[in-house]
């Protein structure tokens, strides 16, 4: 699959409460594993699927991130949901920092730095 994101996703691991309405309009709640996050979206892992285009809310101590499910695929240990945050509802690290957060660009920067020093 070709990468189409305009901003980098940060890898993370955190359990977050989520809420959505099912096809019958009933409120549903679960705890999801937050796999990655960016300014405009996130990936959640759940034990069951939720239909594409469903609006979902991710709760955190200072508020809620609301978005739409863009994909839901099963991979070995559960369902992975791609969430696109609503236009006026972007993620900011100063408001919500997942428990484990890592920018994979740090690895490439470190590798470039080490490669440069080995050439000297």
Image: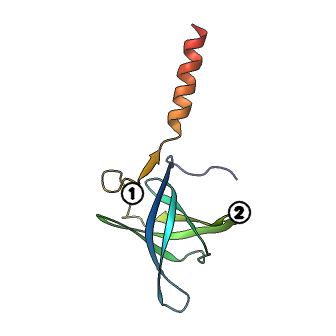
Tell me the residue at 49%/55% (across/down). Answer: 13
Color theme of the render: rainbow
- Considering every residue shown, the one lying at the far bottom of the view is 24
Give the mark nearer the N terminus: 1 vs 2. Answer: 2
Callout 1 secondary element: loop
Q: Which residue is rendered at x = 56% and y = 75% of the image?
A: 53
- Percent from the top left, x then y, of residue 67? 46, 69
Which residue is the site of mark 2? 76
Q: Position of residue 48 (x, y in %)?
A: 61, 75
Q: Nearer the viewer, residue 32 or 115?
A: 32
- Is 95 located above or below residue 110 in the figure? below
Q: Nearer the viewer, residue 14 or 92?
A: 14
| Residue projecting furthest to the left | 62
Work out which quarter of the rendered image holds the C terminus and state it: top right
Residue at position x 59%, y 18% from top?
115
In the picture of the structure, the residue carrying the numbered disc 1 is 91
**For the point 35% across and 56% down, which residue is it?**
96
């Amino acid at each position: 699959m070709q990468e189409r994101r305009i901003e980098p996703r940060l890898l993370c691991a955190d359990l977050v409460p989520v809420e959505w309405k099912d096809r019958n309009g009933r409120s549903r709640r679960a705890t999801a594993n937050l796999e990655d996050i960016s300014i405009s979206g996130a990936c959640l892992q759940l034990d069951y699927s939720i239909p594409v285009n469903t609006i979902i809310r991710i709760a955190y101590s200072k508020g809620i991130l609301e978005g739409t499910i863009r994909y839901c695929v099963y991979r070995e240990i559960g369902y992975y949901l791609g969430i696109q945050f609503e236009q006026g509802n972007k993620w900011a690290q100063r408001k919500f920092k997942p428990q484990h957060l890592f920018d994979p660009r740090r690895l490439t920067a470190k590798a470039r730095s080490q490669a440069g020093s080995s050439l000297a």
